[in-house]
Amino acid sequence: MASVVGRLPSAQASRGSAKPVAGNTKHVAGYPAQPVATRGQQFLSEDLYIQKTGKTVVLSGSVDGTSGFFVDGLLPITVTHQDGSIRSVSFDDSNRCTSSTVLTTAPFSLAPLLAPGFNHLHLTMSDSCGGNYGHSDVWVTGAVNFLAPPYTPPTLDGWG
C-alpha cells in the first residue's frame, strides 16, 4: 500500500495497467530474506539523482517497468527538487504488519513526484514487523537521465 505525502494529485491514480517503458534504468538488485537483528532495522539506503526527460518514469520489479516489486517491510521515497520543494511516497508491503505474507506492489509511476530539472530521490528500505527483511529487484525506468551526485568541495581550515 502506498501513501503519498505532499502537494500533488493522488499518485495512486497513476498505478494500474503497466505498459513497457523505454529509456534509462537504475537497478537495485534483490536481496534474499535475512533475519532482522532488531525490529525496524534499516537495510538499504540509496540516493538517485535524475532529470526527468519525458512523461513516463516507473518504479517496478522489472527492467521494462511492467512487473510488481516487494520490500519485506517499508520503502519510503523522498524526492527533493532543484527548488528545494519536497514530495514523498511510502510503500508498506506488510500492510501495517497485518498481512500473513509480504505483499507485492504494482508498478508505480514516479512521474507526478518529479519536477523539471534536478531531482534527488532518497530511498530507504527497513523492516517493519520483525522476523526477516529483504526485497525483490527494484528498477527505476523510463524517460530520465541519471546524473552524478552533486559535488561539494571539502572545507579546509586555513584555506580561503
Image (spheres, helix red, strand yellow):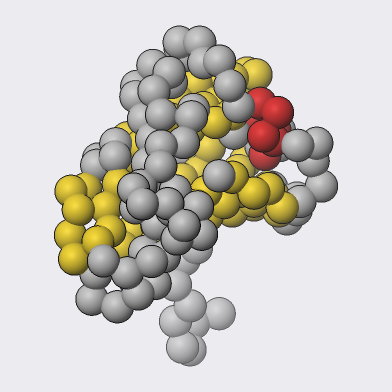
Q: Would residue 137 appear left or right of 89 to someone viewing this image?
A: left
Residue 56 located left or right of residue 148: right
Q: Nearer the viewer, residue 160 or 52?
A: 52
**x, y percent for residue 106:** 48, 29
Assign the N terminus to one quadrant of the image: top right
74 up-or-down from 143: above or below: below
Q: Residue at x 48, y 78 (%)?
A: 155
Can you give x and y, in whole percent of width and height, for residue 19 in the image?
A: 50, 10
Above or below, comparing residue 74 to residue 108 in the picture: below
Residue 101, horizontal then vertical, whole percent: 34, 48
Is residue 10 in view from this perspective? yes
Q: Is residue 39 left or right of residue 154?
A: left
> Of all residues shown, which one is farthest toward the bottom?
158
> Residue shown at 41%/29% (left/top)?
68
Q: Quadrant of the C terminus?
A: bottom right
The image position of residue 73, as x and y in percent, is 40, 57
Q: Which residue occupies 49% across, 27% down?
A: 107
Above or below residue 115? Residue 94 is below
The quarter holding residue 111 reads top right
Q: Residue at x 35, y 74 (%)?
A: 39
Q: How many marks are shown on the rendered structure?
A: 0
The answer to whether residue 146 is seen in the rendering is no
